[in-house]
Image (cartoon, helix red, strand yellow):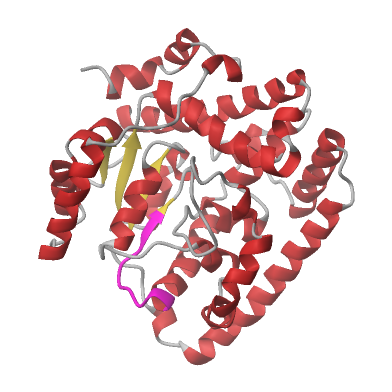
Amino acid sequence: MRISFIKRAFKAYQTIGLTFGRWISPIFAGLYLLTLRTINSIFMKIDWIFYPFKLTKKINKPILIVGNPRSGTTFIHRYLSNNGVGSGSRLYQMVFTSIVLQKLIKPILPILEKISPAKFHSDEVHKTSLNAIETDDPSLLFRFFDGFFLYAFILSWAKDDLLDWFQPKTRDNSKRDFNWLDTMWRRTLISSNSERMVGKLFSISVNIPAFIEKFPDAKLLYMARDPLNVIPSGLSLVTGVLDGVFGFWSLPKEKRQFYIDRLYKALIELQIRFHDDWVNGKIDKEKVMIVKYDRMMSDFEGLMDDILKFVDHEASEDLIAAIKETGEQQRNYESKHKYNLEKFGLTEEKIRSDCAKIYGTFFNE
């Protein structure tokens, strides 16, 4: 299945217009993305003048954090990045991909924050900014106007169910996407003066075998959390952003539930696809470590010892001390977030039934 850029853009424009009655602002947003892509393309060529040898350097032993939103991916991603295990992409590095352009933009980031989409995230649910280390999925949206974020935030609203547009089994963009990630990550490492990449991708849950084929020396950490927690938390995260942009919770109930049902289906699919590849032997288990959220909260020191051994990183004394301190904080942490399943039209029985495979394989103790 081939879906052209023009078709994706038209469908997104049509969907926003019909759903929210906004026909003008999406045009300006689209022009902004096209302008941004053009500027990035020009400056990425300029990068080769200043970094001709560094840009040819291969990505070695990348670490990739994978899992559903709200499964602990952000915490582990930022922890590894902030403690010297590697470097993650900052949001502004995904928006402005060129190394040279990043150097020009960085001094004015505080000004750009005022118009950044990151401002629509609730700090209580997911604190972020242009300078925050973030998931690499948005880079595919900025570069190709495609991928998981396009579906999650916009095309889930479409009258027709377009989930197959983003399924590798029906439309495989892995070669395009992985080549772009390789290009972007090389620049991130140069900008960060780092030797090892720590990436995070929600969408790779459905296509891990292909990712390992592209990056055979990669080590993946798959974050597993009880679906009864991760599903409503993930829904809360995305609908919170949509509420800031479109006033989601002010929309008619039927319209809200239509979208929630679509997004719920996609979040279930992310887990099921990984599960099926895992149990059917399609994933090299020597390259993937299952990291359980509950252990991250109760035995952080033991978990980090296993993670560092798995990714082949020797901990410094400062890192060991930081891990011990974080472990105490994790055990004393109490989440302030309580999610009402009824708010999303869900029940515990439905989630347990739809995620029966997940419970049977990863939460059967």
Residue 106 or 335: which is nearer the viewer? 335
* Residue 80 x %, y %: 29, 57
Could you say which quadrant of the image residue 360 lies in? top left
- Compared across the picture, whether 50 is left or right of 294 comes to right
In percent of the image, x 44 and y 36: which residue is there?
68
Q: Is residue 198 magenta?
A: yes
Give the number of callouts: 0
User: Residue 210 location, x and y as percent?
Assistant: 42, 48
Quarter of the image with the N terminus is top right
Q: Residue at x 46, y 87 (%)?
A: 51
Q: Nearer the viewer, residue 5 or 140?
A: 140
Residue lying at 41% horizontally and 79% vertically, measured from the top left: 56
- Vertical order, 80 against 11 (above or below): below
Where 212 sits versus 169, above or below? below
Q: Is residue 318 above or below residue 204?
A: below
Locate the C terminus by quadrant: top left
Span highlighted in magenta in the image: 191-199
Res 257 → quadrant: top right
Residue 80 among magenta residues: no
Residue 36 on image: x %, y %? 70, 69
Asked whether the viewer can see residue 316, the reply is no
Q: Position of residue 136 (x, y in %)?
A: 49, 55
| Viewer can see residue 183 | yes
Residue shown at 10% from the left, 64% from the top: 317
In the rendered image, which quarter is residue 167 located in? top right
Q: Is residue 192 left or right of residue 343?
A: left
Please tell me which residue lies in front, 169 or 17: 17
